[in-house]
Image (cartoon, helix red, strand yellow):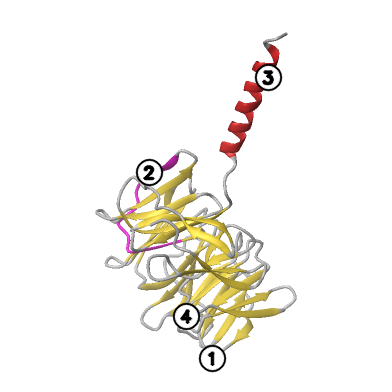
Amino acid sequence: MRHVIPIGILWLAFSVHTRAADIRAPRLGYIWDSAAQSVRPVEGIPGAALLGQALDLGGQFTRAIICENLSYILAISSRERTPFVLQIGTDGVTSHAIEGAMPVDRMVLSPSGTSALLYEARGQILQIVTGLPGTPAVTREIRGPVVEAMSVSDDGLLVLLAVGDALEPAFLSGNSEVPSSIPVSGPVSAMALRPHSHDALLATAGRITWVPSLDSNPSYEAVDEDPSAPLALSFSHDGSRFFAAYTDGRIRVRSLVSGDSSVTTCPCVPDRLQPLRGDSVFALNQAGQGPLFIYDSTNNRVVFVGRGDQ
């Protein structure tokens, strides 16, 4: 009996240590740091967050898009300009190339991150990648359009574009090779597709237009009018609200159900609405070029992120 207590104490101590090691501080996600040419975690919660140390990506990359929902990074390699899928795990980052993917100049993820759209400007080539992150494959290649802004649906079957010098809105659906025009006057300043749907938002000529079922039975509703053109649009996770970011720092949120809207202001010039973890939390600019700000929709506020360790 005299050996039971010491063994029990050792087991208890080991159990407590193991559980403590598994407890991690909350993390809002990751963001591309253009100065470090790497990805850095955003540690903490809105209003009390710091940038962590850059991740070891296992290679050199010039650009990256982070998908928080599926814990992976789509990155462009520095030398070949080819896209890689970098999966974030407890043991670090693992990478693999996308078979058949071309060198690219621009890329976007679908709203939920299950598909991606790649664009090579010189050849005017679009490639649609589906099966992200685990089984990525190039499922379609389209040649011809001169593209500026672009979006792709989660199923990879709808592509939304701003084409030509006039940035006119258009779309590609199914097996179509020629973009179909959208009867909304350009130029397009921002666009977004709703998660798990073919519903679209288009910001053109001081107006945001809501277009449900874009490629099948569309209707057109002006849901916001403003002399300033938003630079970025995004949806909430459930698709019930949309967000618009403006050059004067305003962040507007509007419900597509009730029509209610609210506005807050960032002491910055937003250039994106990059989803982070949480209930519609967005990074408003990239790290490495001045302070990082995030928008917390739960409290309708903009908060600063400290630099942390360099």
Q: Secondary structure at mark 2?
A: strand
* 89 sits left or right of 200 in the view: left
Q: Residues within 10 Å of mark 4 (few under 14, many from 20)?
A: many
> Is the N terminus in the top left, top right, bottom left or bottom right quadrant?
top right
Type of amino acid under label 2: His
Asked if marks 4 and 3 touch (Cβ < 8 Å), the reply is no
Q: Residues within 10 Å of mark 1 (few under 14, many from 20)?
A: few
Q: Is residue 116 visible?
A: no
Disc 4: which residue: 188
Start-end of magenta stretch: 92-108
Asked if 80 appears above or below 299 in the picture, the reply is above
| Rendered residue at 67%/79% (across/down) | 262
Asked if marks 1 and 2 touch (Cβ < 8 Å), the reply is no
Q: How many angstroms separate mark 1 from mark 2 (CA)?
A: 45 Å
**Residue 78, quarter of the rendered image:** bottom left
First reached walking from the N terminus: tag 4 or tag 1? 4
Mark 3 against mark 1, which lies toward the viewer? 3
Type of amino acid under label 3: Gly
176 and 199: which one is in front? 199
List x then y, in percent, for residue 111. Answer: 55, 61
Asked if 66 appears above or below 244 in the picture, the reply is above
